[in-house]
Amino acid sequence: MIGWWGDGNNSLRHQWASEVFKDLRPAENFKELDAGASAVLVSEDRFAVSAKEMSFFNQALGYLQFADGFLRENDQWVPECSYLSVFQKMLAASSAFIDIKKSVMVVGDFIPSRAALLALYKIGFRDFLILKEESAGHWLFDVQKGLFGLQVKEIGVRDLVNLSGDSSVLVHAVASKEKVLAEWELSYMNFLSRPGLIIDFLDESFLEKVVEETHDKDLHLLDRKDIEKESLEWWRLKTGA
């Protein structure tokens, strides 16, 4: 049995998880699932509070400060972040589109993007540019002191037009259309080198349309659905469900 913690009605992840795990059992807390549950998957609205359920965690989870699920091991709920493994795998498969000597452009702060950013740091990226928003703070600033050599810089939307191939990767960490920032400027893609990689957490995104319409073979897109499919496959293999 696989449990589900959080919103199941307004969750893309729940929609796709229901196709993989036919019988997701909703729960208000983990104690309800002690009998027979092998794992609990976490919805998008609970990522931010999942860290409070961690009684212990490894170094990577200490940086990420979220889990996307919990495995039942030896009568304990063990926090896991499948996204870190997912992005390590996806980046390895996309290595032809990556140049670690260049920067990573970051837009938004959707929590699973932390795993993408940490995976990018682990393969050698050190320079990260964050497109400014009105909302203060970004996860990268919180972990900057703990990740040796990490350089984080904020840039304004107007600065995008002055960048020419400065970034090798765009991490579009925006999960809802209401939070889209600088759609026109990002669509121009002048800041992204060729070849280049786009990691996009927005379902049915304008960036996906740009890549399709330009037929630019030197741009590689990792979209939200592919990311979630890999995440759920990780959980399926872990649980044998």
Image (cartoon, helix red, strand yellow):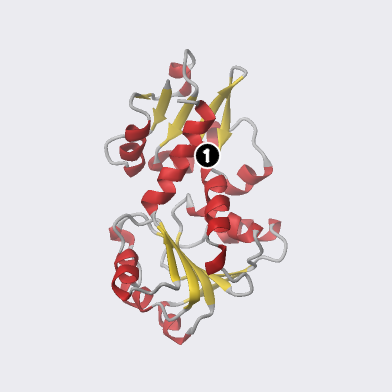
Give how far across and how far down residue 27 sits, in percent: 38, 24
Toward the top, the furthest residue is 35
Give how far across and how far down residue 65 sits, in percent: 57, 44
The quadrant in which residue 96 appears is: bottom right
Q: Is residue 177 visible?
A: yes
Give how far across and how far down residue 206 sits, in percent: 30, 66
Asked whether 130 or 172 is in front, the reply is 172
Q: What's the residue at 33%, 27% (across, down)?
A: 22
Q: Amino acid at mark 1?
A: Ala
Q: What's the residue at 67%, 39% (across, down)?
A: 58
Vertical position of residue 105 compared to residue 88: above or below: below
Q: Is residue 208 left or right of residue 234?
A: left
Q: What's the residue at 59%, 71% (across, down)?
A: 99
Residue, disc 1: 67
Q: Is residue 106 visible?
A: no
Q: What's the residue at 46%, 71% (across, down)?
A: 131
Vertical position of residue 97 compared to residue 18: above or below: below
Q: Is residue 58 left or right of residue 137?
A: right
Assign a secondary structure to mark 1: loop
Query: Which quadrant of the figure contains the C terminus?
Result: top left
Give how far across and how far down residue 23 sits, in percent: 34, 24
